[in-house]
Amino acid sequence: MRRNDKAEAKKRASTRQLIGTKEITEYSLQTYGHGELVYFIIKPSNISVLSEASISTRIYALMTVLKGIAEIEILCLNSRENFEDNKRFLRSRIEQEQNPVVRKLLEKDLSFLDRIQVQMATAREFLILIRLRNEKEKEVLPYLSRIEKSLKEQGFSVKRADKEDIKRILAVYFEQNVTTEKFEDFDGERWVILNE
């Protein structure tokens, strides 16, 4: 395919095609060419308050899970907004600003973002990802239940991500800015009144 053809095909591609997602189901993210992705959200432990023996136990438990389930992939993502671009912009503006009053306001904004980021420093999300490929539909849910049970038996606080969790994960990953509590399946969906 020539370069112009590729560019034209990219222009015609839908947003879903560009980011590689076909559909969000009740328990997974179906992709183009990368299988069906099922996420398990692991609530992180605060290891700063754990003893060395407890940390070793947690590591061993994770190792046990990894040995038992070959298909596991592990992700660590921000679970909230990332303010680095905003802070970089404010620093640049502070350097350029000539008016001392405006400079002081910009410094206060920067300080505010620093405080928020410190409060959210533990806002990480640990995800176990299972990539389903060619599994029979009737076998999928029992298989996922066994994985969830295995994680819980090893002492992890785990939840299989549902549709809303997956939407939030994608919003943070692609947008780095989550300003809503509920995500629509279609843009403007909340404004459409369906006639019954």
Image (tube, rainbow, N blue to C red):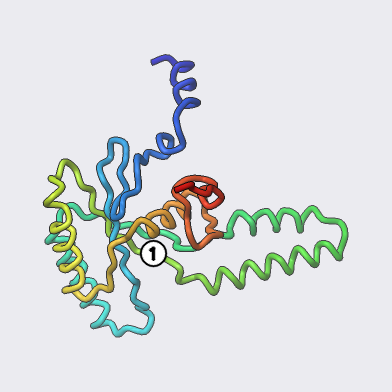
Give the residue drawn at x 50%, y 63%: 181
Q: To which quarter of the image does residue 112 belong?
A: bottom right
Q: Nearer the viewer, residue 163 or 188?
A: 188
- The amino acid type found where label 1 is placed reads Glu
Q: In terms of image quadrants, where is residue 97? A: bottom right
Label 1, on which residue? 125
In the rendered image, residue 2, in percent from the top left (x then y), is placed at 42, 14
Crowdedness of circle 1 by 10 Å Cα count: few (<14), some, many (20+)? some
Residue at 86 percent across and 64 percent down: it is 100
- Residue 43 falls in which quadrant of the image? bottom left
On the rendered structure, is 155 left or right of 16? left
Q: Secondary structure at mark 1?
A: strand
In screen coordinates, is 190 left or right of 40? Answer: right
In the image, residue 22 lies at what x, y percent?
A: 35, 39
Q: Measured along the vertical axis of the image, is residue 181 above or below residue 131?
A: below
Q: Nearer the viewer, residue 172 or 181?
A: 181
Residue 129 drawn at (x, y percent): 27, 55
Which quadrant is the N terminus positioned in? top left
Residue in the picture at 31% in, 41% down: 31
**Residue at left offset 36%, top offset 84%:** 49
